[in-house]
Amino acid sequence: MNLLELKDISKIYGNVNALQHINLTVQQGEWLAIMGPSGSGKSTMMNIIGCMDKPSNGSVILDGTNISKENAKSLTNIRRDKIGLIFQQFHLINYLTALENVMVAQYYHSMPDEKEALQALERVGLGERAKHLPSQLSGGEQQRVCIARALINYPMLILADEPTGNLDEANEGIVLDIFKQLHKEGSTIIVVTHDPEVAEEAQRTVVLEHGRIAKIVQNER
């Protein structure tokens, strides 16, 4: 079953063609990696898939809804209800504990539930660090808080932007193991990355060049 379809997507900023005629289908439960050099269109594609921007042309179908036709308020609701976002820069609130940072996502979705938020942290191995502030956590631990925050509302799509970009090798392995478990449980994952080792964990890798899909690689796993 198709969860996501990009149909002839283009994005133009002034005289810059950031994306040109992108066609891509992502199956429910698939793990996809997006790679490409700086300026290839990776971030633009992520922003469009993540309901943070709209294409200049073409259609984006997410769970049967043409999100490219929705207004800003509707896109915010879709992003909140259906997409779990994981950022390279973490975007944690520095005066809130790990537990409270996870609960913030619950607040915007429905109702905060401390027990459920703690379970999300335990799922990523941070149950004992729940009361710590971001400044008291390592980079790897902060990224795992971000993952717990992304998972708390049971999104149908997990969208991660360079999730291991600021991590050392050991913490990269921990984060990838979490992604492997999520995929095993049936999650649909799209990871934007510059790291070939991260991309190789996905089922397919989409390589962008100059705003176009240069190739799609079926990874051996």
Image: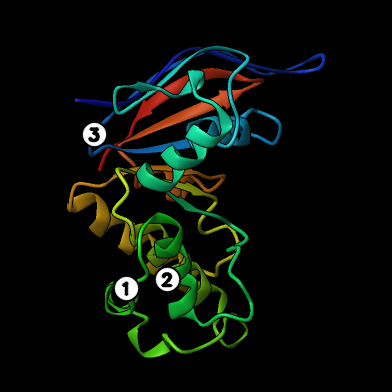
Task: Quote the CA–CA distance across marks 2 and 3.
Answer: 27 Å
**In the figure, residue 168 lies in which quadrant?**
bottom right
- Number of numbered discs present? 3
Along the line of sight, the residue nearer the viewer: 33 or 4? 4
- Tell me which numbered mark, 3 or 1, is placed earlier along the sequence: 3
- Tell me which numbered mark, 2 or 1, is placed earlier along the sequence: 2
Q: Say whether marks 3 and 1 touch (CB < 8 Å).
A: no
Label 2: which secondary element: helix
Q: Say whether marks 2 and 1 touch (CB < 8 Å).
A: yes
- Tell me which numbered mark, 2 or 3, is placed earlier along the sequence: 3
Q: Is residue 145 left or right of residue 65?
A: right
Q: Is residue 111 left or right of residue 30?
A: right
- Crowd rating for badge 1 (residues with CA inside 10 Å; few <14, some 14–19, many 20+): some
Query: Circle 3 sits on which residue?
Result: 28
In the image, what residue type sits under mark 2? Answer: Met
Whether 138 is drawn above or below 63: the answer is below
Nearer the observer: mark 3 or 1; the answer is: 1
Along the line of sight, the residue nearer the viewer: 208 or 12? 12
- Crowd rating for badge 2 (residues with CA inside 10 Å; few <14, some 14–19, many 20+): many
In the image, what residue type sits under mark 1? Answer: Asp
Task: Quote the CA–CA distance across marks 3 and 1.
Answer: 28 Å
**In the figure, residue 25 lies in which quadrant?**
top left
Query: Circle 2 sits on which residue?
Result: 103
Task: Quote the CA–CA distance across marks 2 and 1.
Answer: 7 Å
The residue shown at (61%, 23%) is 209
Residue 88 on image: x %, y %: 58, 57
Residue 41 on image: x %, y %: 63, 28
The residue shown at (51%, 56%) is 163
Label 1: which secondary element: loop
Along the line of sight, the residue nearer the viewer: 26 or 57? 57
The residue shown at (33%, 73%) is 117
Query: Circle 1 sits on which residue?
Result: 113
